[in-house]
Amino acid sequence: MTRIANQLLEMIENRGLVPGSALPSERTLAQQLEVSRPSLREALHILQAQGMVTIKHGQGTFVAEPLLAQELRSKIISKTTDLNELFDAREVLEVPASRWAASKATKEDIRNLRVTLNEIAAITAVSPVNYDQLQVLDAKFHLTIVQIAGNRFINQTLGVLQDVMQKSMQTTLRLPGRSEISRIQHEAMLQAIADGNGELASQITLEHITGARLTAVKDAESK
């Protein structure tokens, strides 16, 4: 049964399924893995007990959010996490992700990142700026880089990272001059990833997050 459970985990990873993604039906999974449906069900129950999947009767089986990610999300929702902790989380997840993305990005990945930066440029060129939309696109750019990195743990915490970024960006993007600084750094990050320069990509990402942190903390202290 462990063998089937491991096959299921490999399938989840290879297909890039993230928390909340639905697995194929039992019939389809059994055919794909060439196992009996009773054996498949037992393997799914093992994974559910390990917190890897969630079985919803009448709906199907879904990739579960890891316990660590659930705890992080709980802290964010309870508002017990301060700004510095939010930016700490971004550094831990995004800096290495930028390095890995530089070694894995395809031409299509680079095109997708460019499209997002073009959309950001279009929004900031219009007055008044739609900061809610700008925040969504800014987060999309960073999350896309994390997804390109292809690290299983980081991909499993994408939802939490999105929550972290939403809270950490609420103030910074609205402050004078921050959008332009962000634009320049985004362009540099994209170029480094396109060039396959992981060290430079991670360095720029760290500078980007550090600058945003200083801006956010300074703004919070002035209120």
Image (spheres, helix red, strand yellow):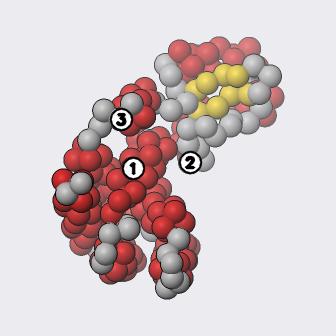
Residue 163, above or below 28 = below
Picture coordinates of residue 19, whole percent (x, y): 55, 38
Q: Earlier in the sequence, mark 1 or mark 2?
A: 2
Instruction: Name which quarter of the figure residue 57 lies in.
Output: top right
Instruction: Name which quarter of the figure residue 82 lies in.
Output: top left
Task: Estimate the spatial distance between the alpha carbons at disc 1 and disc 2, rounded to whole Å.
Answer: 26 Å
Q: Are marks 1 and 2 in contact (CB under 8 Å)?
A: no
Dot in front, 2 or 3: 3
Secondary element at tag 1: helix
**Mark 3 crowdedness (10 Å alpha carbons): few <14, some 14-19, many ≥20:** few
- Amino acid type shown at disc 2: Gly
Secondary element at tag 2: loop
Q: Nearer the viewer, residue 82 or 18?
A: 82
Question: For the N terminus, which image quadrant?
Answer: top right
Dot in front, 1 or 2: 1
Position of residue 85 in the picture relative to residue 64 (left or right): left
- Amino acid type shown at disc 1: Lys
Residue corresponding to mark 1: 167
| Residue 3 shows in this picture | no
**Mark 2 crowdedness (10 Å alpha carbons): few <14, some 14-19, many ≥20:** some
Task: Estimate the spatial distance between the alpha carbons at disc 2 and disc 3, rounded to whole Å.
Answer: 30 Å
Position of residue 98 in the picture relative to residue 52 (left or right): left
**Mark 1 crowdedness (10 Å alpha carbons): few <14, some 14-19, many ≥20:** some
Residue corresponding to mark 2: 16
Picture coordinates of residue 207, whole percent (x, y): 21, 67
Position of residue 15 in the picture relative to residue 175 (left or right): right
Residue corresponding to mark 3: 79
